[in-house]
Amino acid sequence: MDAQTLGFIGLGVMGEPMCRNLARKSGRPVLAYDVRAEPLGRLKTDGVRAARSLAEVAREAGIIFLSLPGEPQVRAACLDDGGLASLATEGQAVVDCSTAPVALARELAEAFAARGAGFADAPVARTRQAAIDGTLSIMVGADETLYRRIEPLLRCMASDVTHCGAPGAGQAVKLLNNLVLCMTVTALAEALAVAKASGVVEGKLLFETLAKGSADSFALRNHGMKALLPETHPERAFPVTYMLKDVDYALALARDAGLDLQGAGTARRLLEETAALGLGDAYHTALIEAVRRHRAA
């Protein structure tokens, strides 16, 4: 293992630009792995070396970053036979930038600690463009020593890095962030649907006026104005299926705390209905299509 070498596993919509910024700004060698050859080819021009396997990354990198779709992929990469937890060595660290359940983050922290390695959950917020620009917000769950070690590297990819607490705390904050966002987008979708169905007020005027009052929000100015209003729900953004996954993780955290969240349950049901309409890969603002399907008796 070379303590200076950084590993990066998962080069999808967010992972590829994150890896690129890490390679360009950290001044350290980066070894990356993905099941697809295309992103590895693109990153070669940034000095990123392609690994042939997870095991190769585990052998060579002192700090390994993950950016994977969710719990099944993170669990497979870390806990399956031949996964990172079984290959970790003393002093190594794994930083999971995926969005995954709090319980999994705690499980991984214990598994890596048993090998003398560190673990941090460091999920990211904001858009793909923010990943490209290096202006993500990253929420970190880690002990203080590991946080100090990885913070400069995270700042290669983010303009805001927040130490939220022990392992699991970063995931908790990210999941609750997305829960609030989803519920806000749901409220905006319902307001816009009412405006359009009633014909009383034009949608653009509604949203512009809301932006001047107490209903103003990041979600209104971005998800509302740029996606809901023009009814543009592109793929390769943050899709319905991803938001559904994150809301499920947040609801699991709530249940573990003894709470049954009613508003979040409604948002989840609308996401599920949107996916059933064949819009699972569309930007999560497509839930307005499910909102429209509910007619008054």
Image (cartoon, rainbow, N blue to C red):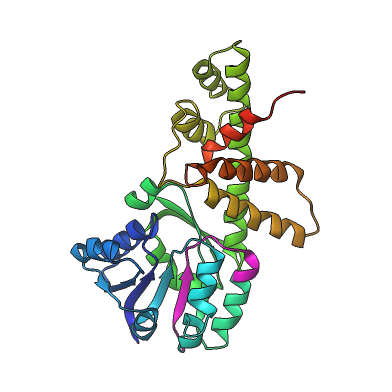
Total tally of numbered discs in the picture: 0
Q: In this image, 45 relative to 100: left or right? A: left
Quadrant of the drawing holding the C terminus: top right
Residue 201 visible in the shown view: yes
- What range of the chain is rendered magenta? 90-104
Q: Is residue 26 magenta?
A: no
233 or 125: which is nearer to us?
233
Q: Position of residue 27 (x, y in %)?
A: 26, 69
Q: In this image, 175 relative to 161: left or right? A: right
Q: Is residue 255 above or below residue 5?
A: above
Q: Position of residue 217 (x, y in %)?
A: 55, 33
Q: Position of residue 185 (x, y in %)?
A: 58, 36
Q: Residue at x 51, y 15 (%)?
A: 205
274 or 112: which is nearer to us?
274
Q: Residue at x 48, y 75 (%)?
A: 77
Q: In this image, 45 relative to 203: left or right? A: left
Residue lying furthest top: 200
Quadrant of the drawing holding the N terminus: bottom left
Q: Residue at x 49, y 26 (%)?
A: 229
229 or 17: which is nearer to us?
229
Residue lying furthest left: 45
Q: Position of residue 141 (x, y in %)?
A: 56, 66
Q: Residue at x 45, y 36 (%)?
A: 233
Q: Is residue 103 magenta?
A: yes
- Give the quadrant of residue 255: bottom right
104 or 145: which is nearer to us?
104
- Give the quadrant of residue 214: top right
Q: In this image, 206 relative to 153: left or right? A: right
Residue 181 visible in the shown view: no
Q: Is residue 4 above or below residue 25?
A: below
